Amino acid sequence: MRVVVSIGGSVLAPDLDARRVEGHAAVIERLAREGVELGAVVGGGGVARDYINAARDLGANEVQLDQIGIDVTRINARLLIAALGPKVDPKVAHDYEEAGDSIRRGDISVMGGVMPGQTTDAVAAALAEYVDADLLVYATSADGVFDADPNVDDSAQRYEELSASDLVDVIAPMSRDAGASAPVDLLAAKLIERSGMRTIVLDGTDPERIERAVMRGEHSGTDIIPDGTDDEPSYWAQR
Ligand SMILES: Nc1ncnc2c1ncn2[C@@H]1O[C@H](COP(=O)(O)OP(=O)(O)O)[C@@H](O)[C@H]1O
Ligand SMILES: O=c1ccn([C@@H]2O[C@H](COP(=O)(O)OP(=O)(O)O)[C@@H](O)[C@H]2O)c(=O)[nH]1
């Protein structure tokens, strides 16, 4: 089974904590030992937003801010690589070909950002399509996709399931400024729709939730169902 996991910066590095990174690395290594071929994409987190906000104050434009964010995501990628054992490619993959070559060699590949105008959500969706992944998992700081920001609106309702095209409609109105928060970005939603990629959005604060979702299909987040299919997800590692 081949899986791409997007570990949001708000989950991996809201602040710098080696034990938190270690916890995610331990789950990734356990999945690899179970024979799951893995690509991990990590976000920028709190440090990226601090740098982006400071640079915005200095008058940087959104592309320059995105470039700063990309650099921070790649530092976080190095942090995760440092916590992973010998099966990880020690080089942060800067494009999908590099990541795909690592995964096809049987290594774990870790990416950060790739280009301005998007977030690591889009990187994970593009990588999943590029390597024909069976499953794409977004480990973020909300337990799925809601009809409003659950950390702002107490009445926000979680979608248990969303079709890929409905996901695009939910995400479309959200901000695309550098450093903006959303469960997935708009480009990611469009790539998921185009590729028909089975996708889960879940709260990855506890990395073992990622493991349960991949190995047994158990999660309390949102299943993104490819348009035109309504069959029960059948991509779990243990089926
Ligand atoms: N409709 C929504 N559904 C879920 N989360 C949302 C929604 N709108 C905004 N959010 C916010 O997006 C946050 C996740 O985005 P972000 O901070 O970029 O996380 P990540 O680090 O995973 O990229 C959630 O914690 C939540 O506060
Ligand atoms: O391919 C990418 C990935 C990231 N970013 C920039 O880096 C920031 C941090 O990345 P991300 O939002 O994915 O981090 P997270 O939300 O997971 O902390 C983004 O907001 C963008 O400004 C970008 O421009 N291109």
Image (cartoon, rainbow, N blue to C red):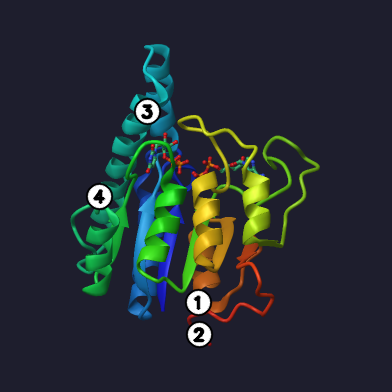
Q: CA distance from mark 1 to mark 4?
A: 28 Å
Who is closer to the viewer here, 81 or 199?
Answer: 199
Measured from the top left, where is residue 236 in percent x and y? 53, 79
Q: Is mark 2 within 8 Å of ligand 1?
A: no
Judging by the rendered image, the residue that carries numbered circle 2 is: 238
Measured from the top left, where is residue 118 in percent x and y? 44, 41
The quadrant of the picture showing ligand 2 is top left
Give the left or right position of residue 67, taking residue 199 as reference: left
Give the left or right position of residue 226, taking residue 44 as reference: right
Mark positioned earlier in the residue sequence (1 or 3)? 3
Judging by the rendered image, the residue that carries numbered circle 1 is: 215
Q: Is mark 4 within 8 Å of ligand 2?
A: no
Q: Quadrant of residue 60?
A: top left
**Amino acid under label 4?**
His
Mark positioned earlier in the residue sequence (4 or 2)? 4
Give me the residue at 38% from left, 43% from top: 17
Mark 1 Cα shell of 10 Å, populated few (<14), some (14-19), many (≥20): some
Q: CA distance from mark 4 to mark 2?
A: 31 Å
Image: 118 above or below 126: above
Mark positioned earlier in the residue sequence (4 or 3)? 3
**Amino acid under label 1?**
Met
**Amino acid under label 2?**
Gln
Mark nearest the camera among 3 and 2 is 3
Q: Quadrant of residue 202?
A: bottom right
Mark positioned earlier in the residue sequence (2 or 1)? 1
Mark 3 Cα shell of 10 Å, populated few (<14), some (14-19), many (≥20): some
Judging by the rendered image, the residue that carries numbered circle 3 is: 63
Give me the residue at 23% from left, 66% from top: 102
Check contact, mark 2 vs mark 1: CB within 8 A: yes
Q: CA distance from mark 3 to mark 2?
A: 43 Å
